[in-house]
């Protein structure tokens, strides 16, 4: 039993960890430390189990014939790493959501009710929206701009976007921006956690 390839329970646990990491990477600014901790504390023990099982199977000559099932955990890990390297989780989610986010951003004005309940805009949960006005005191709103404040349903994450038709957003000690495409920026503001 212990010298057999990983079964469905093992592969399900490993796939769940992979899905959590990929979901966490689908926002503009990753919480990299948390992703590494999840991989270390949950993924590493699964790979230690794999090494023990593989070692026992190899010592008994039972590796032959099921090489595909023995290699599958490494294929999953390589797929996750490759997806993270090219930022695929974020770009896939953002590309699918962009048309809905652009349509929603066109409705944002100074008079937009800021006490809205969260709503799905594309694949992101947007909980607040307001026009971008810059850092100057009493600054005018940039026409056509929108700051979209998102909250993830599964865990806390800084999922914010800025649509800025003119210029670039001003960075501060608390606010950093990542240019995404066109007039879209990912925004990481002050993080209360």
Image (spheres, helix red, strand yellow):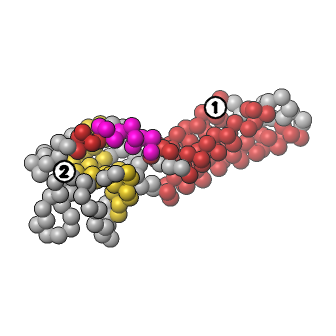
User: Compared to 105, does 170 lie above or below?
Assistant: below
Secondary structure, mark 1, is helix
Residue 58 in picture, x, y percent from top left:
86, 40
Range of magenta residues? 91-100
Q: Nearer the viewer, mark 1 or mark 2?
A: 2
Depth check: give the residue in front, 93 or 159.
93
Q: Give the dominant element type of the magenta stretch: helix, strand or loop.
A: helix
Q: Is residue 5 visible?
A: no
Q: Residue at x 37, y 57 (%)?
A: 179
Quarter of the view holding residue 102:
top left
How many angstroms separate mark 1 from mark 2 (CA)? 50 Å
Residue 45 in picture, x, y percent from top left:
66, 47
Depth check: give the residue in front, 140 or 153.
140
Q: Is residue 188 inside the magenta stretch?
A: no
Q: Residue at x 29, y 37 (%)?
A: 100
Residue that label 2 marks: 144
Q: Residue at x 69, y 30 (%)?
A: 7
Q: Is residue 60 visible?
A: yes
Residue 18 in picture, x, y percent from top left:
56, 42
For disc 2, the neighbor class at 10 Å (few under 14, some 14 to 19, many from 20) is some
Counting residues from the N terminus, which is met first, the one under dot 1 or under dot 2?
1
Secondary structure, mark 2, is loop
For the residues labelled 1 and 2, say whether their Cβ atoms are less than 8 Å apart.
Answer: no
Question: In the displayed structure, does residue 7 sit left or right of residue 127?
Answer: right
Question: In the displayed structure, does residue 178 sit left or right of residue 132?
Answer: right
Residue that label 1 marks: 9
Dividing the image into 4 quarters, which one contains the N terminus?
A: top right
């Amino acid at each position: 039993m212990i010298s057999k390839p990983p079964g469905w329970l093992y592969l399900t646990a490993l796939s769940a960890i992979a899905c959590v990491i990929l979901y966490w990477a689908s926002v503009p600014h990753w919480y990299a430390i948390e992703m590494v901790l999840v991989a270390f504390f949950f993924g590493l023990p699964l790979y230690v189990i794999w090494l023990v099982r593989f070692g026992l199977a190899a010592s008994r000559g039972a590796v032959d014939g099921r090489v595909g099932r023995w290699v599958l955990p490494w294929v999953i890990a390589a797929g996750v790493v490759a997806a993270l390297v090219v930022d695929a989780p974020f770009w896939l989610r953002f590309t699918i959501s962009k048309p809905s986010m652009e349509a929603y951003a066109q409705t944002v004005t100074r008079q937009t009710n800021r006490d809205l309940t969260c709503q799905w805009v594309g694949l992101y949960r947007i909980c607040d929206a307001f026009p971008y006005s810059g850092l100057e005191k009493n600054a005018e709103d940039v026409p056509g701009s929108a700051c979209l404040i998102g909250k993830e349903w599964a865990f806390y994450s800084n999922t914010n976007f800025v649509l800025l038709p003119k210029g670039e957003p001003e960075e501060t000690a608390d606010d950093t921006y990542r240019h995404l495409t066109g007039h879209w920026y990912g925004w990481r503001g002050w993080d209360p956690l």
